[in-house]
Image (tube, helix red, strand yellow):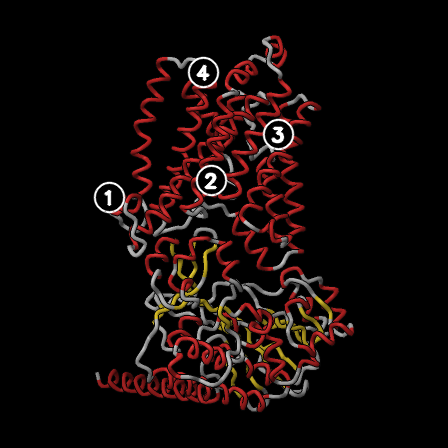
Amino acid sequence: MKMNHIFYFIFLVSSLLSCTIKVKESLKANQNNLVKYAKNFSLTIHENYICFELLNPETKKVEKKFALIKNDSIKIPEGLTPILIPIKSVIALSSTHIGMLSKLDACNLVKGISNHSYVHEPSVLESYNKGEIIEMGEENSIPVESIIRSKAELLMYSGFGKAFPHQEQLEKLGTICLANYDWKENHPLGKAEWIKVFGYLTGKENNAAIYFKIIEKDYLRLKKIASKLKSTPTLFSGNLVGDIWYSPAGESYNAILFKDAKGDYKYAHTKGTGSTENSFEQIFKDNVNTKYWFNPGVESKKELLKSQPKFKLFEAYKQNKIFSYTFSGNEFWERSAIEPNHVLSDLIRILHPELKLKNKLYFYRTLSK
Amino acid sequence: MTVARNNKFILFTLVLLFPILCGMHLFAGEITVSFSDFWNSVLNYNDENTSQTIIREFRIPRLTMGILAGGGLSIAGLFMQTMFNNPLAGPYILGINSGSSLFVAFSVMTGIPFLTSNLGTISSALIGAFIFGLIILSFSYLVKSHISLLLIGIMLGSFTSAIVSILQTMSEPNQLKLFTMWTMGSLQQVEYTELPMIILFFIVGIGLSLFMIKPLNALVIGESQALTLGIHVKYVRLALISITAILTGIITAYCGPIAFVGLAVPNIVKMIFKTQSHLTLLIGCFLIGSFFMLTCDIIIQVLESTIHIPINALTSIIGAPFVIVIVLKRLA
């Protein structure tokens, strides 16, 4: 009996000790984690390397681990793919990648893009016109030869749920493929936080950290200003695709922006981070008197009526309160992810004219006739 | 031009059921509206009242387009089947819808102001349907096999799809978006104020069809026999193509390409009425075509809270297996 007690005591103490050690390790990792808002990656500082963990946007499980190293003689644990930093060349397949590189003044590293007609950044267009940047085409149909020809060290792609075609062979040939899930981040600051990844990759981590701090501060300042306002104007968003209206779901990137701008978004109560579907009749019933309509995907009222003549029945149409970012499509896609403070500023300025904010509208414009 | 007694009874039953189905369609939507709202929306419209607006601007145009699209495409299909003496013919499979689509694609994606207007789109759809109708008619003189003609129709469809794909790669994103939306098909594009014009086009088409009943009945027994009965087959064919172009063009312009209705419904009508009298078949096609389309749209509205099905997809889901059944029956 006594022996049993002693055995249980030892077992209890060892279990507690192991738990404490695990908690301490986890705390240490959390303290090292440089990420605050983003949910689809983690960055942790280790003695000889930075560990960049790419998390699956759906399951949040680690999809791939990278060790960002400054010297290829550094030994790293097994299972990590080494990336020698700072990288000297990159294929950037999404507008947001170019936007983030641009903020770090690192567009000179770009050696490949998907399509020059989607690019706004003048320096990238200039290099493309000089023949220094190769146009690769759509992400899922890029010829391997073009990637090899570009001699890029890193290929950054959007990773729509699957690995890059011929990823293993490309990595053997010296081009590491890295999925960027910024587009799956729901929090506007989470999207912007991906600049930290670009910072470490390009050796400009301090610039990235400072830049992020500035926009974070500005975003939170604007959010605070909006939160103190009494009015919450009603708004809805999206447009018809066929007979279905897709609106941002209540926990999505857009819904968070609307909430932070102190707008009364009609579908804020819906679950999910993607979009919510409604019939046109339902949207009409819910929003016939809604004050603002955002992101209809067109630039003029004429185009809007061409796609569906019944839009003229909406109060937002009658009062000319429809706002779109498509006037500067490429610029919006490049800059909005990294400038969420400016997107929020636009929304606050539109929704709360009583504030009389002096700054201009960065992306949004009211629809032309 | 008489209708058999048994068929009279079926037609009478369909006519009686027709307003019931229309009523079901009007009140099937996700949003509940009352009968008084319906009356007021027609007789005493108040545009401040959301329920009345929903009925007047959404449901009445949708119901009307359902009736016209189902009835019109079925009649066009009947004409094609009699003209080419082929039960598998129809405006969609013979490439007439594709002609409309191609011309609408040109009109939407060129960006020329007149062509991008509503009138431009309708004219393009009508011209496209007429030209492709003439093309398929010309081919019908060259090939005698039914299957070959269908294959030519399918090839015309593939050809136009390829041209449309090229146009899409060259067009502006907004124009591309507009065209893509149009191809999805919808009964909700029409405004209440546009209904009189569309109904007028339709009445012209149906009115002209009534003059075609005798020649169509003659064509059933064969081209040479029709000639001996004093029918000018060439003119009749041209007239049939023109009517088909009017009916198909106007429907395609407003609703997008709708598949299989023009093929499946005339066959169903022939099975039900068991007659070659085109007066019966024409009325039957109009009624059963409208029934078919309205039923599809009621299903869509009932399922709307769970799943959103485009009208084009539902008509294909129901129509395609039906075509397979017809083919298998012919082989047996």
Q: Nearer the viewer, mark 4 or mark 1?
A: 1
Q: Is the same chain shared between marks 2 and 1?
A: yes
Question: Which residue sits furthest left?
Answer: A1
Instruction: Give the camera-side residue of A201 and B149.
Output: B149
Measured as percent of width and height from the top left, residue A205 is found at 58, 88
Say if B6 sits above or below B328 in the image: above
In the image, residue B104 sits, relative to residue B1, either above or below, namely below
Q: Which of marks 2 and 4 is in front?
A: 2
**Residue at 33 percent of width and 82 percent of height:** A229
Is A163 on the left-hand or right-hand side of B13? Answer: right
Q: In which quarter of the image is residue A96?
A: bottom right
Name the quarter where the N terminus of chain A is drawn: bottom left
Within 10 Å of the Cα at label 2, are there few (<14), some (14-19), or many (20+) other Cα atoms?
few
> Identity of the amino acid at label 4?
Thr
**Reading the chain from its start, which is encountered first: label 4 or label 3?**
3
Q: From mark 2 to mark 3, how far is it between C-alphas?
A: 33 Å
Dot 1 corresponds to which residue? B35
**Circle 2: residue type:** Met
Q: Is residue A65 left or right of residue A284?
A: right
Q: Which residue in the protein does label 3 denote? A: B150
Which of the two labelled residues, at mark 2 and mark 3, occupies the earlier sequence position?
Answer: 3
Tell me whether the residue at label 4 lies in contact with that at label 3, contact meaning CB atoms closer than 8 angstroms. no
Please tell me which of labels 2 and 4 falls first in the chain. Answer: 2
Residue B295 falls in image quadrant = top left
| Observer able to see residue A267 | no
* Residue of label 2: B197
What amino acid is at disc 1?
A: Phe
- The reply to whether the C-beta atoms of the residues labelled 2 and 4 are less than 8 Å apart is no
* SS for callout 2: helix
